[in-house]
Amino acid sequence: MRRIAIAVMGTISGLVLLFSYHTSLGPETHAASGGGPGGGNRLGDGATPAGATPSGGAGATGGASPSPSAGAGAGQPAQGGTSGTFVGDEVPTRWGPVKVQIVVQNGRIVQAQAIEYPNENHHDEEINSWALPQLQDATVQANSAQIDSVGGATVTSGGYIASLQSAVDKAHL
Amino acid sequence: MTPDPAVVPRLAGGPGEVLPAPEQPRRAWVEQVMGMPVSVHVRGPLARDGDTGAAGAVDLLYAELRRVDAIFSTYRADSEICRLRRGELSEADADPWVREVLALCAEAHERTGGWFDAHLPGPDGVRRLDPTGLVKGWAIERVTRALTARLPDHDVLVNAGGDLAVRCRRTDTPDWRVGIEDPADRTRLLATVPMRTGGSATSGTAARGTHILDPRSGRPVERGGSVTVVGPDLMWADVHATAAFASGAGAEEYLAHVAGHLGFVVRPDGSTATVTGG
């Protein structure tokens, strides 16, 4: 019974998020998820309630959004419940904005994909041609490995991770 | 079971044992500052509190990093570093932070045998002041220590584009688990390091293309792989990682002489070596 409710909530929040993705890019959606004070360019907040499934990874551990509505709704069902597609906030990087979409099944990230990334010049294409695709699998693996943070020589991937963070927050993993 | 923070962390063989669920509240923030995403993780009783708790302390951390950027950025014409370059500002009149960093740059040059150098050739080949390679580690270490001073009984982790500093003031929490990326294949983590205090810095060419200059030749370091250094202080870990990477094939020998630090070298052929300096 609870699991059914959870699945429904996940679907609803997924739809809401996809809708808000089309209508409001960036700060507005993040503000709605309880970004806290001073968050003009705050990219995402996350919190892992005690006992929740460890989530995220890749420098982006942290689970449910701290927003009150999340806590009352789909925030707690980490026991294998959440499924859906979630889109992260747009995150600025040195080369341009990055946005990530994740697909969640039963509380696990099964796919992570950059749906918006910088491509204004050849240098950017060069960066994108290898950095972003390789990170997709890394995020999945890091999620399963319970990593708190990832060390590496990154800038572009860091922006990717930041965007992933907000997507993870919205998924309330 | 609780590791002595004074002991150099050991490398575990990869994603492995399952940790117990954290009992302390936890929260993460991410903000773009100094040209990179900086994420902050806080674990402890006030982690999810607002202005009077972790959120207020983290706001101060980001404000301090923005001040660092305003003073040290080589991309802002009005920064003190750019004014020093143009001769509009003398070192004696510079911000105390600038004088501190320049003194540390000189010390780093000496301690690395010249492998770290804050006077690097620009695109035109002319050497000019560029302390960027030290400022990042210095700033992150500084704000992490300040954050932990504002948040007693909390654990904090700050990751700035792949270099990170941690401070744990709790003893009932699991170690922070830090994964080290494979520079040739981002789908893999090559190792994990359990950390409670100190810093981890990685130098390599994988993410941004060639960006590390050999201070002796003035030319970019042409090699693959990466060097990760874990030590008690992120700034020095970063300095030694940069110096070891710049020394190319001599990286492992270099790290063997850095006391109290753990070095993890990914060679250009993909093989790895763990070096404990001493």
Image (cartoon, coloured by chain):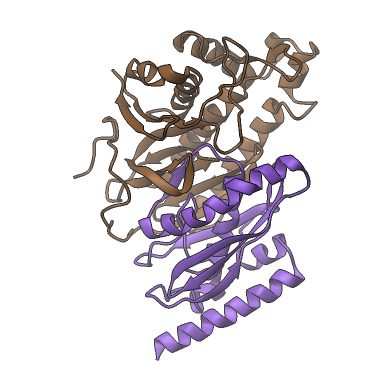
Q: Is residue B150 visible?
A: no
Q: Position of residue A113 (x, y in %)?
A: 59, 61
Q: In this orientation, which residue lies closer to the viewer: A142 or B224? A: B224
Q: Position of residue B17 (x, y in %)?
A: 26, 54
Farthest residue, direction left: B1
Left/right placement of residue A67 relative to residue A20 reads left
Q: Which quarter of the figure is the N terminus of chain A placed in?
A: bottom left
Note whether B178 is above or below A14 in the view shown. above
Left/right placement of residue B150 relative to residue B78 reads left
Quadrant location of residue B120?
A: top right
**How many discs appear?**
0
Farthest residue, direction bottom: A1
Q: Is residue A17 visible?
A: yes
The residue shown at (75%, 25%) is: B79
As drawn, the chain in brown is: B
The residue shown at (57%, 30%) is: B136
Quadrant location of residue A77?
A: bottom left
Left/right placement of residue B159 relative to residue B170 reads right
Farthest residue, direction front: B269
Note whether B51 is above or below A24 in the view shown. above
Q: In this orientation, which residue lies closer to the viewer: B65 or A101? A: A101
The residue shown at (50%, 69%) is: A172
As drawn, the chain in purple is: A
Q: In this orientation, which residue lies closer to the viewer: B251 or B168? A: B251
Q: Position of residue B76 (x, y in %)?
A: 77, 29
Q: Position of residue A9 (x, y in %)?
A: 52, 82
